[in-house]
Amino acid sequence: MSTPAVASSRWLALASLCLATFLIPQAMSAVNIALPMIASELRADAVDVSWLSTVNLWGSVVLMLPAGRLADMLGRKRIYLLGTLSFALSSLLVLLPQTVESLLLVRLCQGLSSALVFGTAMAMASALFDDKNRGMALGLVSTSVYLGLTCGPLLGGFLTEWLGWRSVFWVPVPLLLLSIVLVLAAIKGDWRSRERGRFDWLGSGLFAGWTTALFFGLSGLPDWPYLLLLGAGFILLVVFIRQQKASAHPLVNIQALQQNRVLSRSLLTGLFMYGAHVPLLFLLSLYLQFIQGMSPAASGQLILLQALMMACLAPVAGRLSDRFEPRLIATLGCLLFAAGHLCLLGVDAQTSMAQLATALILLGVGFGLFSSPNNNAALSAVNKDRLSIASALLSLARTLGNMFSMAIVVLLFNQMLGSTELSPEQYPALLEVLQLALCLGLAYSLIAAWTSWSRGKVR
């Protein structure tokens, strides 16, 4: 803690962080459950629907590392507050007359703003609780993020039915403003690194370039312009890595990252686990409403099972990771998450609610055991001056996993559903997309279990 004032009010500060890190993912994921209504009102085709769940991830990724570096240089609280306020203001843009294109722009602005929040939130929580309670604090922030992601469909379902789909954007705004007030009241001063250095503008541009080229190139395969874009993305990635190694003030110290096995394997574990998670939530929302014929509220209630399991276990797992090796708990979580995917393989229009509920419980338990220990291991492996960039790397692993796995979903929608509105004739193709995504998610979960186990000991 920086000052006694911070020490005396750190729980209030943590509560404000948890509030924002719940509301922003909740607002982002609530859109998934409103997609059928959005598609109907704005006459969006299947590809537009997939982009509405994806473009915000791209916006978040391109700013994530620069946000973490700026937070270490200029102050974590300052960057965090800027991101929270920007997210609130961009969400209010939905009150203006909408087309699919303008709504995509709103989602992009939300993604850019969220990068500033998630590039700093974990670092702020870690700095507030840099003692034996760090794992528990990180567990609470992690719970807020994942609870927001998974409660989004439930809350979005109710809001969509009662107030219309636009409400999933504007309803969280007053509480986001409350979170800003709480942070200003509870956290005095601004945390930054002792050595500010210089900001790496070239590295930031290269990072944005390779992630953008890979993302859009992957989503448009196999057409040759997208193949060229994909190739350009790989070239820019190589250039970015070389530039970072040569830079005196890099965004990421590549050599240090390669030498820090615990941090690098924790990031890989997060990348694959999140890559398995978000496409599943998106596709389950469509499956339950289109194929099972459930209402937005009812499908959101079913998906809530995962959130409840996650919320119950993440703080406990975080506390346990303060006492025991984090890799043991996180690896068990990865394996249980894989078991949830196995339980969903073969779902169709006749699949029972009991089977779906069992799978969601397994997914929630698995993710709850994985998330906090993985974050605790990563942040315990870096010094305090680099907490913001480590926090940004964790969030980057999450959003990169989400973005590239959703790019594959966009590719599947392009190839198997095309630019037509979703109708009963396309439900078999939608089921095929779900099955392919489940197979990929299962593979990702098993890879994550291996990288988690192989990271080595923290203590």
Image (tube, rainbow, N blue to C red):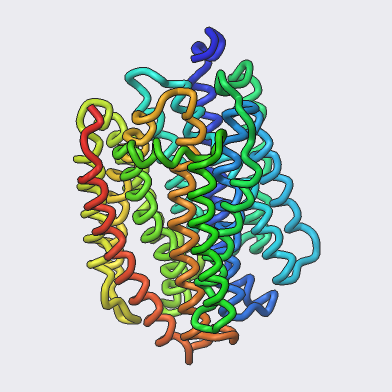
Q: Residue at x 53, y 64 (%)?
A: 233
Q: Residue at x 60, y 27 (%)?
A: 197
Q: Residue at x 33, y 36 (%)?
A: 260
Frontmost residue, 208 versus 434:
208
| Residue 359 position by quadrant | bottom left
| Residue reaching furthest to the right | 97
> Residue 399: percent from the left, percent from the top?
49, 53
Q: Is residue 30 above or below residue 132?
A: below
Q: Is residue 198 left or right of residue 250?
A: right
| Residue reaching furthest to the front | 246
> Residue 108: percent from the left, percent from the top?
66, 58
Quadrant of the image containing the C terminus? top left
Q: Is residue 7 above or below residue 152?
A: above
Q: Residue at x 19, y 40 (%)?
A: 328
Q: Is residue 455 above or below residue 187?
A: below
Frontmost residue, 235 versus 47:
235
> Residue 289: percent from the left, percent from the top?
47, 73
Number of marks drawn: 0
- Residue 108 visible: yes
- Residue 53 visible: no
| Residue reaching furthest to the bottom | 425
Q: Is residue 234 above or below residue 454?
A: below
Q: Is residue 169 left or right of residue 308?
A: right
> Residue 67: percent from the left, percent from the top?
60, 40
| Residue 212 position by quadrant | bottom right
Frontmost residue, 396 versus 23:
396
